[in-house]
Amino acid sequence: LAKTTQPISMDSYEGQEVNITCSHNNIATNDYITWYQQFPSQGPRFIIQGYKTKVTNEVASLFIPADRKSSTLSLPRVSLSDTAVYYCLVGDYNNAGNMLTFGGGTRLMVKP
Amino acid sequence: DVKVTQSSRYLVKRTGEKVFLECVQDMDHENMFWYRQDPGLGLRLIYFSYDVKMKEKGDIPEGYSVSREKKERFSLILESASTNQTSMYLCASSPVEGEGNQPQHFGDGTRLSIL
């Protein structure tokens, strides 16, 4: 069961790059790493997913080292609207017996 | 656009009542999930289902049961509600096709209070 560990909170300023790291020492071979964003009174929203190396989309980048025991979500030039809780998720949904694990989440506060 | 709809945004029930939380998705997804979210604890998986009439326990299934009679609907049941089940409940769905974890699409949650 791949548990995850993230910082509880982070502060940043508008325009800065934010990097949030997630540790998952027991990640299994078939597990993928997925990040979600959650605003108050809403359900989480998918941001990005990766298996190894680097993945980039229009919202963020995800860096995964060769040993895959951690991953880093990178948000370029954050704005006030990026203030949210970010969750790291490790698992293999397509394996019906496998457990899904959310980390405790990182509360990002972006200041003007 | 995927829509996951939870039947109530807010619900107040009494200790000992049987409580039903309903979730419907409109994208023909195979997988459906129920989580609860509590301050400081993040999201915790209660149950998930990968097909009609199939269910698997998550991390915290005690005190809950689920029902999936139709592909689009996944119900969470509190057999005898207790105050420690006061929480935000989130439903999600995802498809199976393709590689990796297909993104889960979440509803906006039901805030349940047990008095």
Image (tube, coloured by chain):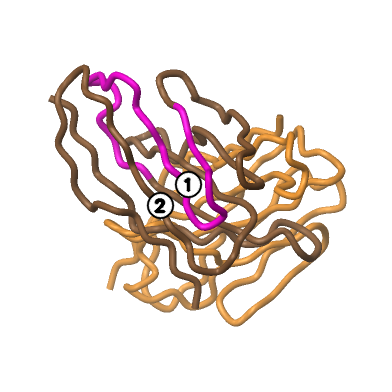
Chain colours: A orange, B brown
* Mark 1: secondary structure: strand
Magenta stretch: dominant SS? strand
Q: Chain of mark 1?
A: B
- Among the 4 quarters of the image, the one containing residue B14: top left
* Mark 2: secondary structure: strand
Tell me the number on the disc at residue A73: none
Indicate left or right for B23 with A26 as reference.
left
Using the image as rendered, state which of residue A56 and residue A41 is in the foreground. A41
Indicate left or right for B86 with A50 as reference.
left
Q: Which residue is mark 1?
A: B74
Q: In the rendered structure, does residue A108 fall within the stretch colored magenta?
A: no
Residue reaching furthest front? B69
Using the image as rendered, state which of residue A7 and residue A27 is in the foreground. A27
Position above or below: A109 against A16 = above
Q: In the rendered structure, does residue B84 fall within the stretch colored magenta?
A: yes
Using the image as rendered, state which of residue B86 and residue B77 is in the foreground. B77
Q: Determine contact: label 2, label 1, CB under 8 Å.
A: yes
Residue reaching furthest bottom? A58
Q: Position of residue A37 (x, y in %)?
A: 46, 60
Indicate left or right for A84 with A50 as reference.
left
Residues in magenta? Answer: B65-89
Name the residue: 39% across, 58% down. B107
Q: Who comes first in sequence, dot 2 or dot 1?
A: 2
Name the residue: 60% across, 38% down. A101
Name the residue: 18% across, 19% down. B15
Give the crowd class for mark 1: few <14, some 14-19, many >=20 residues within 10 Å: many
Quadrant (top left, top right, bottom left, bottom right) of the N terminus of chain A: top right
Q: Position of residue A111 (x, y in %)?
A: 30, 67
Amino acid at the residue labelled 1: Phe
Q: Which residue is mark 2?
A: B23
Quadrant (top left, top right, bottom left, bottom right) of the C terminus of chain A: bottom left
Position above or below: B47 against B81 = below
